[in-house]
Amino acid sequence: MRLSTYFLPTLKETPAEAQIASHRLMLRAGMVNQETSGIYTWLPMGLRVLEKIQKIVCEEQDRIGCHKVLMPTIQPAELWRKSSRYEDYGKEMLRIQDRHGREMLYGPTNEEVITDVVSQYVKSYRQLPLTLYQIQWKFRDEVRPRFGVMRGREFLMKDGYSFDLDLESAKSTYRKIFESYLRTFARLGLTAIPVRADSGAIGGDMSHEFHIVAPTGESAIYYDKAFESLDVDNISYEVGSSLYAAADEMHKAEECPIPTSDLKSARGIEIGHIFYFGTKYSEPLGAKAVGPDGKTIALEMGSYGIGVSRLVGGIIEANHDEKGIIWPESVAPFKVALINLKAADVKAQELCDNLFNTLTSKNIEVLYDDRDERAGTKFADMDLIGLPWQVIVGNKTLETGMVEIKNRRTGEKQEIAIEKVLEVVG
Ligand code: P5A
């Protein structure tokens, strides 16, 4: 992508309304634009990150055999009356009437809709277990939308729903998704701590929240310090049941099973939340199946959320410095910033164009700063945007064919021949 023709509206000044680093940096790096409280437009750079996160989330869901669907954002109130949640949900639900005066709502979550779908098509234990998921926009009229995309009113969620015939099978599904979440977050460059949690408005008997530790986190969490040095490639549900971690409302100091020397308390950002709630929705909405014994029973259900748009802010909270964002490679909007410091020079243009073509032909995503701007502006913009690698073409390149390569995370710089760039960043 050539920066001269891209839409990247970066800001020099820090917007006054932004209280935390990720919000400030997302606005300054031209990733989002606020339309009204808690509602954002995703600009090209922000959207690239959002889409990278979605891709990883989908790959990990598909890997464990979940199937992707897409439900509507607008739902009929009738389904929520059946589950008795229409009144309970209160002011957080955006209620709408269509032209016929029918009551509708903008979905804050989709347990009712998916249970309705499954009730129509699943009739036998042979169709189970089944987990369906989607990535779809939700609306919750939060009392205090804040911190940018972290607590929005309209936000993107991965929501999955599992259907099993019995408790044992439902628990095994829950475990599988629990493990898969740790793997998903690790791929996003995050250490997530699975804390035992209250199931709140979704309801149910068993629930875990996944938190990343950050001073700006909205919740207090308590956890065994062993979570910080876990081997992320070999994590299992055993971790969830044997190591201690709890959300504030679940933590009782006097009942805590581990010595205080091992207990850490921190602020956490909730990036995922999973629930097992048995037949709470399947019963009233009629999702049943005939078991091998010929008896018809209500399905055992769970639901599993990941805050996809919140993750963009969360990843920045965990990966930035005073100059800007430091993207983990897996979600970086581009991998390489190619900075031409002699943009008006024909020879420099030719060298950069060739390098740009070589890298992009190898499927390496390059943001090519071909603007005729001061070096200081270019460096500041690129540090702010935070792509993993910066390749700098300047006077020295014209004289000796050498470019400077900077690693944004370590700050390490090296000089190499322009032909060797692919070897380093590839
Ligand atoms: C699980 C999937 C649910 O809604 N139903 C379907 C269950 N869970 S949840 O905990 O309420 O939400 C799941 C995740 O969504 C993110 N999230 C938000 N992100 C941005 N702004 C918000 N206002 C917001 N509310 C929830 C969180 O990451 C949460 O874990």
Image (cartoon, rainbow, N blue to C red):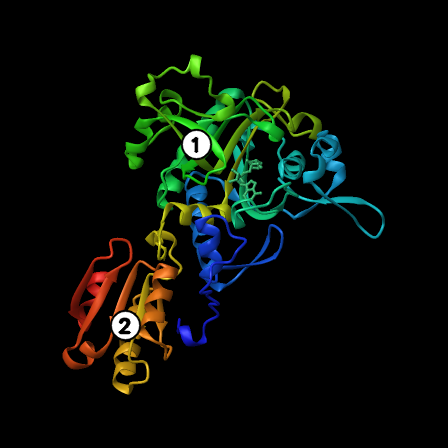
Q: Which residue lies furthest to the right in this view?
A: 100
Q: Which residue is at the front of the view, 119 or 27?
A: 27
Whether residue 11 can be seen here: yes
Q: Where is residue 375 in the image (x, y as percent from the top left)?
A: 31, 73
Q: In this view, does 393 lie above or below 153?
A: below
Q: What residue type is labelled 1?
A: Phe
Q: Residues within 10 Å of mark 2 (few under 14, many from 20)?
A: some
Give the quarter of the image for residue 178: top left
Q: Which residue is at the front of the view, 209 or 122?
A: 209
- Which label number is shown at residue 358? 2
Image quarter in which the C terminus is found: bottom left
Tag 1 residue: 178
Q: In this view, does 57 lie above or below 303?
A: below
Left or right of 325 in this view: 33: right
Q: Position of residue 251 (x, y in %)?
A: 46, 20
Real-space Cα separation, disc 2 to disc 1, in angstroms: 41 Å
Left or right of 135 in this view: 49: left
Q: Which residue is at the front of the view, 156 or 280?
A: 156
